[in-house]
């Protein structure tokens, strides 16, 4: 289970969470920092990533696309990279459930 971190999250998260989510990456690793949301969703789906973002813009396209790309939406306001890391660590079991369940496409974490 690999995570793809959106541009609004620190690239350091991929390294910090490698013990739980090996092979995770940041959009900048693929030159996608400025890519439109639909491109990121397509990329995540095609390459087997779960997209992690603080951006609400992914919710509607995910719904309209038939739930094919998996999305973790971190619903926390202004916070540190360490806080985001702690949230993802704390809720790793929920992220794993999202990855294994075909009819789920979105997980909101607070």
Image (cartoon, rainbow, N blue to C red):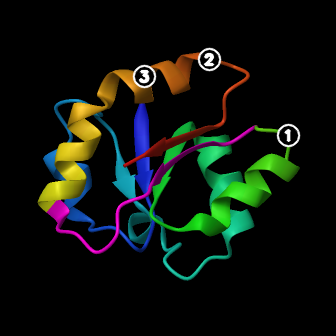
Q: In the rendered structure, does residue 79 fall within the stretch colored magenta?
A: yes
Residue 60, x across and y down, in percent: 76, 59
Specify the label residue 101 is tagged with: 2
Element class at badge 2: loop
The residue to which callout 1 is attached is 66
How far apart marks 3 and 2 lie (CA) works out to: 9 Å
Badge 1 density bin: few <14, some 14–19, many ≥20, Cα 10 Å: few
Q: Is mark 1 on a helix, strand or loop?
A: loop
Provide residue 38's location: percent of width, then percent of height. 74, 64
**Is 94 or 35 nearer to us in this picture?**
94
Q: How far apart are marks 3 and 1 (CA)?
A: 20 Å
Report the front residue among 6 and 29.
6
Q: Does the magenta stretch include residue 14?
A: no
Residues in magenta, as a range: 68-81
Tag 3 residue: 96
Q: Which of 29 and 18 is in front in this view?
A: 18
Taking 13 as reference, is 101 above or below it? Answer: above
Q: Residue 96's image quarter?
A: top left
Q: Which disc, if any, is residue 20?
A: none
C-beta proximity under 8 Å, tags 3 and 1: no
Earlier-in-chain disc, 1 versus 2: 1
Name which of mark 3 and mark 1 comes first in the sequence. Answer: 1
User: Few, some or many C-alpha atoms within 10 Å of disc 3 (few <14, some 14-19, many ≥20)?
Assistant: few
Q: Which residue is drawn at 28% across and 34% down?
A: 22
Q: Earlier in the sequence, mark 3 or mark 2?
A: 3
């Amino acid at each position: 289970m690999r995570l793809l971190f959106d541009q609004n999250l620190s690239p350091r998260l991929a390294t910090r969470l490698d013990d739980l989510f090996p092979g995770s990456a940041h959009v900048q690793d693929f030159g996608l920092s400025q890519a439109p949301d639909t491109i990121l969703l397509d990329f995540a789906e095609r390459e087997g990533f779960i997209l992690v973002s603080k951006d609400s813009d992914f919710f509607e396209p995910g719904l309209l696309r038939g739930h094919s790309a998996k999305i973790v939406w971190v619903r926390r306001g202004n916070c540190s990279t360490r806080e985001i890391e702690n949230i993802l660590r704390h809720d790793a079991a929920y992220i794993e459930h999202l990855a294994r369940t075909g009819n789920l496409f979105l997980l909101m974490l607070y």
